[in-house]
């Protein structure tokens, strides 16, 4: 990341700090909600990344690692835990037998349905504040 030389006003610093605080509150909410479902936060993030992935290429360990911003070997271990817990299955990719595609199970779909409903409510509650903060930062140019 490169420093652009742009400086913020005092109001800009306040908006940036408030934005980070609001995002941290959302992440804390998300972690707690996942834990109540018996899922570590990173497993919830992985399931959501798999469910929401709509690209041409199939979801693989490498793609999931990129989406989660973690190393491929860490992603392999995460997927292994998800397979053992009954949330994910692996299948050989017909186009490349060395690759395995990742698919969600019905159990994963059920837990994601519940978690996504409460997350959507939380996002809708936070949206006006987030929009206000982003607007303030956009104006502070």
Image: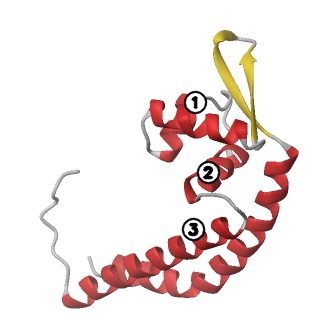
Q: Secondary structure at mark 1?
A: helix
Q: CA distance from mark 1 to mark 3?
A: 23 Å
Lateral position of residue 111 relative to residue 9, left or right: right
Sequence-first tag of 1 and 3? 3
For residue 43, which numbered disc appears in the image?
Answer: 2
Q: Farthest residue in the left direction?
A: 5
Residue 61: x %, y % from top left: 57, 30
Q: Which residue is mark 3?
A: 31
Q: Which residue is mark 1?
A: 61
Residue in the picture at 78% in, 71% down: 117
Mark 1 touching mark 3, by CB under 8 A? no
Q: Is residue 6 above or below residue 105?
A: below
Q: Secondary structure at mark 3?
A: helix
Within the image, what quadrant is residue 57 found in? top right
Mark 2 touching mark 1, by CB under 8 A? no
Color style of the picture: secondary structure
Residue in the picture at 66% in, 71% down: 33
For residue 49, which numbered disc appears in the image?
Answer: none
Q: Is residue 29 above or below residue 63?
A: below
Mark 2 Cα within 10 Å, few/some/many (few <14, many 20+)? some
Instruction: Tell which of 92 and 13 is nearer to you.
Output: 92
Mark 2 touching mark 3, by CB under 8 A? no
Sequence-first tag of 2 and 1? 2
Lateral position of residue 132 relative to residue 7, left or right: right
Sequence-first tag of 2 and 3? 3
Q: CA distance from mark 2 to mark 1?
A: 14 Å
């Amino acid at each position: 990341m490169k420093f652009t030389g742009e400086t913020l006003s005092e109001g800009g610093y306040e908006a940036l700090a408030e934005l980070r605080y609001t995002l941290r509150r959302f992440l804390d909410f998300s972690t707690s909600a996942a834990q109540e479902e018996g899922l570590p936060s990173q497993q919830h993030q992985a399931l959501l990344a798999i469910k929401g992935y709509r690209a041409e290429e199939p979801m693989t360990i490498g793609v999931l690692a990129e989406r989660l911003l973690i190393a491929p070997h860490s992603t392999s271990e995460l997927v292994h835990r998800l397979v053992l817990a009954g949330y994910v299955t692996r299948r050989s990719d017909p186009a490349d037998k060395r690759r395995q595609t990742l698919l969600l199970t019905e159990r994963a779909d059920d837990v994601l349905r519940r978690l996504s409903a409460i997350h959507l409510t939380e996002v809708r509650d936070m949206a006006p504040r987030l929009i206000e903060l982003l607007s303030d930062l956009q104006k502070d140019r």
